[in-house]
Image: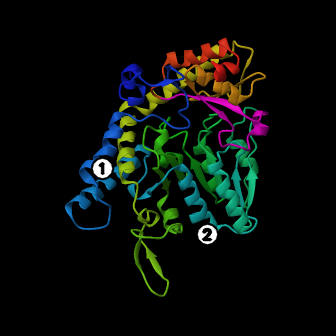
Amino acid sequence: MYDVYKVRKDFPMLDGTKKMQGKPLVYLDNASTTFKPQVVIDKMNEYYTTLNANSHRGDYDLLYNMDVAVQESRKAIAKFINADENEVVFTSGDTASLNLVAFGYALKFLKENDEILISETEHASNVLPWFKVCELTGAKIKYIPLDEDGKITPANVKNVLSSSTKIVSIAHVGNVLGYEINIKEIAKLVHEVGAVIVVDGAQSVPHIKTDFKDLDCDFLTFSAHKMCGPTGIGALVGKYDLLDKMDAVFGGGGMNVKFSTDGTCIPLNPPSKFEAGTLNLSGILGFKAAVEYLEELGMENIHKHDVELFDYAVSNLEKNENIIIYNKNSHNGILTFNVKNVFSQDEATLLNHKGIAVRSGQHCAKLIDDVVKTKATVRASFYLYTTKEDVDALIDALNEGGDILDAYFN
């Protein structure tokens, strides 16, 4: 197990000088985005100071070095999630990756009355693209029933699978309730009916060891900024045969063999055919540095740390009868709660007044109201640099309570 206090020294945002409302920063919004270690920042700066060339655009040394760096980054990310290099497509993040599957694969192959299975716990990025695909193709959305905790189970997936099911798209770990789903077993059921499974890994890949081949999902999406990497870069990982069948959603330089005056265009093979235009090259280098940083700490260690903090928080907050915890059985890095008779955004504002950063609202999961039986919640989310003292600060603040007006007038 790593030393969390030593790890914190790697992060400029945690140097002890950052304040909120004049108080030491307690950052508990890691499900939204994570801080970046100095090695990631340095690697991004390296692009602008020593490489600064486009990729796949010429034959001089600087550009060749950039091409090598991009390929090394692709190799590192493929290794991180156990995929082949040619199965990793660089995108701007999880949202872009899910949209690429929706409009490059689903729009091409789905027809009227085909079914797409999702759940009411999904993030907007894993809902709205499918709504649009259904509008354009005549396919239909079908919702997977949830168990009493709000979790997707293989049994419930099996109950709604049919010969009409063509795509199942679900989060490995939900961004509100935080349950880890048994993707491997669900993938087996999905494949038995001839459908494909898309896994939103935005909240799982940063926190748990993820093996693309072992899970046997068809597509996996994730963002670098939720795993100590830069914003604006992420990956779509797909089985090569499916990537090969997909349409390229974007056309432009760098994604084609040739195009002609008659309107024909011959795309490059995956992953290049999906990477039109100039890539986020500094982001790609930072992405590689981030996954190597996580590997050095050990994904099993990171997950263990998340679980320990979650269980500690729940065991203490359960003693407070004014706290409603919506996912006490998830045992992951996401804790979702409310204070009785307090609007979630008021509570988050009060916590901000005490120097504690949490998320409030619907968390971009606007179908979940019927699951949690409330319109909005507060979400505290932990990561590899979160300390027990950070969690204590949250517990103490919630136990202490306070008047929301204090946050505005004091």
Residue under the point 61% across and 69% down? 108
Provide residue 58's location: percent of width, then percent of height. Answer: 27, 68
Q: Which amino acid type corresponds to the residue marked 1 in the rendered image?
A: Tyr
Provide residue 138's location: percent of width, then percent of height. Answer: 74, 67
Provide residue 330's location: percent of width, then percent of height. Answer: 63, 29
Find disc 2 in the rendering and name its residue.
108
Relative to 280, is 206 on the left or the right? right
- Range shown magenta: 358-383
Residue under the point 46% across and 45% down? 231
Residues at discs 2 and 1 in contact (Cβ within 8 Å)? no
Residue 377 part of the magenta-drawn span: yes
Q: In the picture, residue 145 is in which quadrant? A: top right
Disc sitting over residue 47 in the figure: 1
**Relative vertical location of residue 293 with respect to residue 171 in this rendering, above or below:** above
Res. 173 visible in picture:
yes
Check disc 2 and report its element: helix, strand or loop.
helix
Check disc 1 and report its element: helix, strand or loop.
helix
